[in-house]
Structure formats: structure tokens, C-alpha cells
Amino acid sequence: MRISISDYTVGAGVAGDLVNTSPTVRSTMGEALPDPEALAGFLAERDLRLDALADRPPTEDDLREVHLFRREVRGVLETATEEHAVAGGTVLAMRAGLSPVLQREPDGRWQWYVPTARGASLADELAALVGIGLLGVVRALGHERFRPCDAPGCRGVFVDTSRPGRRRYCGDLCGNRLNVANHRARRRLGSVAP
């Protein structure tokens, strides 16, 4: 797998999405990755082509390792300081990431990539992708972009890679749920007015 250093938003997005599949976050819905097929779907939805899965689908062992890795990612996203975030991101990146290489793109431009180690596990390749993404966010946008969801009762976390940096929710579900609740509250207030 080749991980683009300049496109850190991919790894950062995978970090938040993966953490938010946990039953800890999804208490009413349960585990979003209950089996290898769900893990395959998660990867496919994000167009992730991992070398570890070049000739096979995810296994129960892969799923178990990804569930454990998910906890590590949450730990990095909840760090209190930039230094801790960088240390955590570096540890993740080093699980399968090799030295950066400069490669020419089809359009002739040079691009930095981090290749992953041959034979790396699915979880280790994800770790390299996520680690490089989180390091890129700290460098380009700052550690304050690692955030908890603002929705009441949600335990989700995310990395805000949006240009304005004003994202408040871990996903569309929380944002939509809160917007609907606010709309209904406004309508109730409007119907009570004299």
C-alpha cells in the first residue's frame, strides 16, 4: 500500500469513522463491525485497497486486530496535547510504514508516499494510514481539530479536516438528529405563542 503524505484527510477520516463503529459510541445500535463482511464493507466504502487483502477477504483474526486497533486510535484522538498526539500518530505510522519515497505521478508531478511493509497485517496497514493522516492534521491544521462530538449523549470523536474548522458532530446522524430535535422544539414554541 502507498499512503500519500499530502492527502492526510483520508487517514484522518478513517480514524474517526473507525472509532465511531464501536459499541461504546453506538450504544443503542451496537457494534458496526460485527463480522469480517462488515469490515470488508467498511473498507470498500472508503475505497481502501490494502495489500494485506490483495488476494483474500478479511478474516476473524483481522477483525479482532482491527477492534483492538480501534481502541488505540481513540486514545490518540483523545490526547490532551499536540505532543501526545504526535507521539501516538508516530507509533501508529511506524507499525507498517516505511521510509517516505518520492515518486512521479502520471501527470509528471512528484509526490511523497509512505509505502507499507510487505506482509503487514490489515490492522498494521490501517495504523500506518491513520497515523500518517493524524500527523498531517496536527502539522497542517492543529491538534485542536481532534474533537469529541457535541451531540448530547454521543461518545463519538472525529478529526475536523474541513476548511473552516467548525464541524461539531462525529457524523451526519448526530448532526441530523440534533437539527431535527431543535426544529421540533422551535415548532412547539411557535405553536404555543399567543
Image: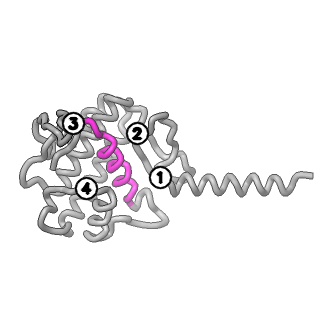
Cα separation between marks 4 and 2:
19 Å
Q: Secondary structure at mark 3?
A: helix
- Quickly name the residue at label 4: 48
Magenta-highlighted residues: 5-22
Q: Nearer the viewer, residue 53 or 34?
A: 53
Residue appearing at x 55%, y 52% in the figure: 175
Residue appearing at x 46%, y 62% in the figure: 27
Check the image and report above or below for 7 versus 20: above
| In magenta stretch: residue 11 | yes
User: Closer to the camera: disc 4 or disc 3?
Assistant: 4
Label 3 vs 2, first from the N-terminus? 3
The amino acid at mark 2 is Thr
**Residue 18 placement: quadrant:** bottom left
Proximity of marks 1 and 2: CB atoms separated by less than 8 Å:
no
Label 4 vs 1, first from the N-terminus? 4
Cα separation between marks 4 and 1:
20 Å
Q: Which mark is residue 171?
A: 1
Taking the image as shown, residue 152 lies to the left or right of residue 134, namely right
The amino acid at mark 4 is Leu
Q: Residue furthest right?
A: 194
Label 4 vs 3, first from the N-terminus? 4
User: Closer to the camera: disc 4 or disc 1?
Assistant: 4
- Quickly name the residue at label 2: 161
